[in-house]
Image: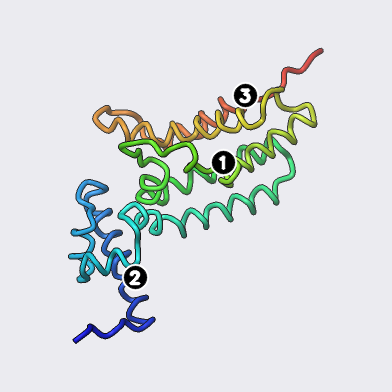
Amino acid sequence: MPRPQATPEQKRAARRAILAAAAALYRESGLTDISARAIAARAEVSVGTLYTHFASVVEILQALWQKPVAQVSAELEAIAAATPNPEARLRALLRHYAQFALANPAVYRGAFLHVRAEPLPKDARMSPEATAMHRLLTEAIRAGQGQGELVTGNPEILAQVLWAGIHGVLALPQNLDRVALNPAQGQLEPMIDLLMRGLAATKSN
């Protein structure tokens, strides 16, 4: 006799249970022990049920991070819109990105620090402009260049340099946790100052 088909509510409940199980496993041991079988066991569903909702474990983890990443992207958009001065806008964007990372360490590790065993093929990668952070930094740099306040150069490359600088401050203590480095919190403002000094246009007398 065929198994009764799950109702829409049962499907939603199973999806929620899978996501909750993956989140719990990630909190407990990072990526180390996350597998389809482990998630299914924690969620009390079959592996087959898991794969009816998600194509892979990677897709499950991406679903966990999607909402908070969308939220911080919206916050960055609001900051950019409310900060007309390009230099102040850049500082505010870098600072908020860092504050998000510090306030949401699990999300930041998963969404921004996760390194794949094999890199994605080029045709599967999104454009940097598809990310709010890169696009907003680029727009602010372009505006500052137009006002003569920031150095000349490719705004997209300069935006990546800024992002890499603040990302590095956040990532280094986590990636090299065997080294007694100073916490990221105390390094953020010095790094932002350093980055902005490097971006400032030289004033002629």
Give the residue type at disc 3.
Arg
Q: Are marks 1 and 2 in contact (CB under 8 Å)?
A: no
**Label 3: few (<14), some or many (≥20) within 10 Å?**
few
* Comparing labels 2 and 3, the label whose residue is closer to the camera: 2
Residue 144: quarter of image: top right
Q: What residue do we see at 52% from left, 53% from top?
A: 72
Label 1 and label 2: CA atoms lie apart by 30 Å
Give the residue type at disc 2.
Arg
Q: Nearer the viewer, residue 28 or 130?
A: 130
Q: Secondary structure at mark 3?
A: helix
**Label 2: few (<14), some or many (≥20) within 10 Å?**
few
Give how far across and how far down residue 138 sits, in percent: 65, 37
Q: Is residue 176 above or below residue 201?
A: below
Left or right of residue 130: residue 148 = right
Residue 187: quarter of image: top left
Q: Which residue is mark 3?
A: 197
Dividing the image into 4 quarters, which one contains the C terminus?
A: top right
Q: Which residue is mark 1?
A: 127
Left or right of residue 159: residue 26 = left
Give how far across and how far down residue 171 sits, in percent: 39, 35
Q: Nearer the viewer, residue 134 or 99?
A: 134
Q: Which residue is mark 2?
A: 16
> Which comes sooner in the sequence, label 1 or label 2?
2
Give the residue type at disc 1.
Ser
Q: Is residue 173 above or below residue 76?
A: above
Say the numbered circle drawn on residue 77.
none
> Which comes sooner in the sequence, label 2 or label 3?
2
